[in-house]
Image: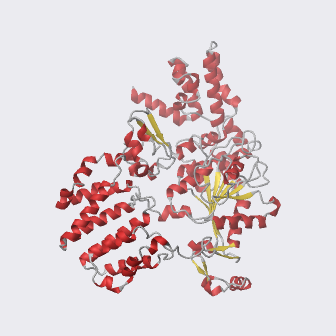
Amino acid sequence: MTKIFQSFDVGFFDLIIADESHRSIYNIYGDLFRYFDCMQVGLTATPVQYVLRNTFQLFECDTQNPTFNYSYETAVDERYLVPFEVFTYQTQFLRRGIKYDELSEAQRAELEEQGENPTVINFEARDVDKNIFNRDTNRHIIHNLMENGIRDASGQQVGKSIMFARNHEHAILLRKVFDEMYPQYGGKFCQVIDNYDPRAETLIDNFKEPGNELTIAISVDMLDTGIDVPQVVNLVFAKPVFSLVKFWQMIGRGTRLCLNLFGPGKHKQLFRVFDHWGNFDYFDFHYQHKEPSVSKSLMQILFEARIDLAAAALQAPDRIAFEMAAALIGADINSLPEDSIAVRERWRTKRTVSNKETLRQFDPNIVVTLRTEIAPLMQWVNIRGSTDARELDLLVARMQVERLRASSRFDDYRIQLLDQVNNLQMHLNPVREKEETIRKVKSAAFWSAVTIADLEQMRTELRDIIHHQRSGGGDPLPPKVIDVTDGQVVSERRSSSIRSVDMEVYRKQVEEVLTSLFDREPVLKKIRRGEPVTQTELDQLTSLVLTQNPNVDRDVLAEFFTNAVPLDHAIRSIVGMEPEAVRERFQIFVQKHPKLTAKQTRFLSLLENHIAKYGSIEIERLYEDPFTVVDADGIDGVFPETDADELIKIIDTFSGPAAESSRNDGMAGGD
């Protein structure tokens, strides 16, 4: 679209939708949105607090105040996405690195047996699985997933999982270690999916297929974002992540709801995150989100260097050098593409400052205009194929500035330029044609009395051949691979840093315990029938929950149930009510209104089903889906006001005395 958008009229489109709008569209694709005159919508799954200020400005929104925001917490609460629980698991090497001074005698002996010199082993934690690979460390990572990951419907094997590896070599090592540890899976259960494999897209399709044996995908960037596999129930962070936006996008790979994943009516309730690099701790305690600055383009830096050159020439003073710099600045301005929207918006300024007489004046106002308005436009100059030449232009411009200032930095730049000249491939014909210039530049005599004009002539002679330099080095040495028993493991279950999500996970745990007690616990039966229970019975039930699930913390349990709602009502919101008990409370209303319409009967059925499932209902829900499917106005469109009030009184009995009292107080205040 960036190549053809100007072939359309500015009013051609009624609506433009930009997906993934958190990316730097204001810098790369901004012309598209400035050109068309229509409604424009930007979409992004990035949390609102991490979207760049410039993106909000492009769509004419206040910073961090989008037109609409639907948060992950809300999606979890409304059951469109699932929450997650976090398990941290770090070995000695992942925490502290692999260092000779900290290795035990047994670990040193293992290295010696492998032909390694232990005394030269000195790697920080950040180097593990990057510059040095330890097979046993990766055994821990794989074993943790296979033992503690959420399993499939059969309970026989781990469910769909994504392992995020540091690089291609690390991914390959993880797969090899997995095959060694679990040969019974025949090599197809766990596979690497990255750009090195031409079958990557086919492997992704296999991974998405529910019945395919590809169950563990080891990803190097390809599955970090934009992949939708609802069956994923485990995410393994086998690498550190330093971008908070990318981190939450990676977390998003597990949030998809998946119905009937574990059998009919047994939906995906949550997923697990195994964090082996302390990523959650990093973002909680060390990470500071900053608005990233837009990096300057090479042409902008060169343009600003030439402004500095003109200023230095005036200060020297050196009229010839100034005239040369002014001419270069004018040529740069005239190279700006007229078809760029950003350039076209400043055409009047461009025409003014490109005038030779205006540039010769070079007064402070002109300099400010050049730096603030024209320099940023230089990013739109097409320098494809001439980057090396432009970099030489920049180096020479800096040399000229320092020469005029009589600065010692000139020698630093001279050495840098000579390195490039010495690296030219003299056997190539284009380079041989410049042999005389190259010989002169290498001579001491040239530099003993070099002038600004000499440097400029050197630049024009060398810029067309400077790309003919020898490429450095050969293939880098492969990372070292060792196999040393990793040390002490520190593991724990920790919060997700999102309280509402943590509470939803906790709710699932409590629900699991209560569901298992339905048939044999009399207190639960009374709660499900809506019968009153004593405090002693509730205390006994709480103790039973704590006994059944050691992961349920007593303090969190107390926090979970601390509100005006009685404990039995809170529990009933989890386990629901017996449908027959719900139907009994509405029976009087039905008998009192024997001529209910089909619409009213359907509404009552939806109401009874909801209360049977959740134990109660908020009045506001009567004006939302699915009740608005019966009538767009909810309960008001189905029942007359007096009948609706009668129904609400029945509904209040499911919410407890507190809710009914609160509603009566509100009515009294209104009167």
Q: Position of residue 322 (x, y in %)?
A: 22, 67
Quadrant holding the C terminus: top left
Q: Position of residue 259 (x, y in %)?
A: 68, 41
Q: Is 294 left, or right, of 116 in this rendering?
A: left
Q: Position of residue 558 (x, y in %)?
A: 58, 52
> What residue lies at 63% left-to-right and 32% top-to-bottom?
610
- Nearer-the-camera pick, 248 or 459: 459
Q: Position of residue 161 (x, y in %)?
A: 68, 55
> What residue lies at 36% left-to-right and 81% top-to-bottom?
440
Q: Up-down: is 35 above or below 164?
A: above
Which color scheme did the rendering employ for the protein? secondary structure
Q: Is residue 536 visible?
A: no
Quadrant of the image occupied by residue 403: bottom left
Q: Up-down: is 461 above or below 112?
A: above
Q: Up-down: is 574 above or below 178?
A: above
Q: Is residue 160 visible?
A: yes
Quadrant of the image occupied by residue 296: bottom left
- Nearer-the-camera pick, 117 or 621: 117
Quadrant of the image occupied by residue 33: top left
Q: Is 562 left, or right, of 334 in this rendering?
A: right
> What residue lies at 36% left-to-right and 61% top-to-bottom?
299
Q: Up-down: is 593 above or below 552?
A: above
- Nearer-the-camera pick, 224 or 580: 224
Q: Is 485 left, or right, of 43 in this rendering?
A: right
Q: Residue furthest right?
A: 184
Q: Is 637 left, or right, of 460 in this rendering?
A: right
Q: Residue furthest top?
A: 595
How many numbered marks appear?
0
